[in-house]
Image (cartoon, helix red, strand yellow):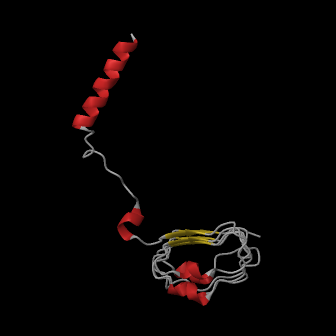
């Protein structure tokens, strides 16, 4: 029985050495980074940040997540994020939203919930692609007047007093 198993094993080994494994059917998908070779998502959640780090102002970034830090303000450089589509800065210490955010033409989603001292947002009508704004659990407890004029906005989530 041992000789039989040894013979089978040797036959298998010989055939795989002689014929190899056809690997032309194997394909690997490497994700978006393979095509663009750029950082498109930057998640800096739970880092204890007090300010937005320089690497977060890379203009290639499409999704910037700064949730659950101690950030009090966004820098003016935020307006240089030409490709930014999603900005999430939930549960920080924002007192105001820097108006430079209005320069982010491709911005689609803005999450500001949990910034209890935030009581107003700038006029975001220049952000023509903006579809979602979430300001739950902030000092904003009514729909700002400028939001009524934003035809593309689909969702403005806020808490009543």
Measured along the vertical axis of the image, is residue 83 above or below residue 79?
above
Q: Position of residue 38 (x, y in %)?
A: 43, 72
Which quadrant would residue 159 be assigned to in this image? bottom right
The residue at 53%/86% (across/down) is 79
Residue 143 x/y as whole percent = 64, 76
In the rendered image, the quadrant that contains the N terminus is: top left
Q: Residue furthest front?
A: 3
Residue placed most toward the observer, 79 or 149: 79
User: From this viewpoint, is residue 53 visible?
Assistant: yes
- Quarter of the image containing the C terminus? bottom right
* Nearest to the observer: residue 34 or residue 51: 34
State the residue in front, 137 or 74.
74
Residue 3 appears left or right of 20: right
Residue 109 visible in the picture: no
| Quadrant hosting residue 118 | bottom right
Q: In the displayed structure, does residue 108 sit left or right of residue 134? A: left
State how many labels appear. 0
82 left or right of 143? Answer: left
Residue at 41 percent of width and 65 percent of height? 33
- Which residue extends farthest left? 19
Give the answer, above or below, for where 147 lies relative to 33.
below
Q: Residue at x 46, y 82 (%)?
A: 82
Residue at image location 28% in from the left, 24% down from the top: 11
Q: Percent x, y for residue 40?
A: 47, 70
In this view, 146 is above or below 49: below
- The answer to which image quadrant residue 29 occupies is bottom left
């Amino acid at each position: 029985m041992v000789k039989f198993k040894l013979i089978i094993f040797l036959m298998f080994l010989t055939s795989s050495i002689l014929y190899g494994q056809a690997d032309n059917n194997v394909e690997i998908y490497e994700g978006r980074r393979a095509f663009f070779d750029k950082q498109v998502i930057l998640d800096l959640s739970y880092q204890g940040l007090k300010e937005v780090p320089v690497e977060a102002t890379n203009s290639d970034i499409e999704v910037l997540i700064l949730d659950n830090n101690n950030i009090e303000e966004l820098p003016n450089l935020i307006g240089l994020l030409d490709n930014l589509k999603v900005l999430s800065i939930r549960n920080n210490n924002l007192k105001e939203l820097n108006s430079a955010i209005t320069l982010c033409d491709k911005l689609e989603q803005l999450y500001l919930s949990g910034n209890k001292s935030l009581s107003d947002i700038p006029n975001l009508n220049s952000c023509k692609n903006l579809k979602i704004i979430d300001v739950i659990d902030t000092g904003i407890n009514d729909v700002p007047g400028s939001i009524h004029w934003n035809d593309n906005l689909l969702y403005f989530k806020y808490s009543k007093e």
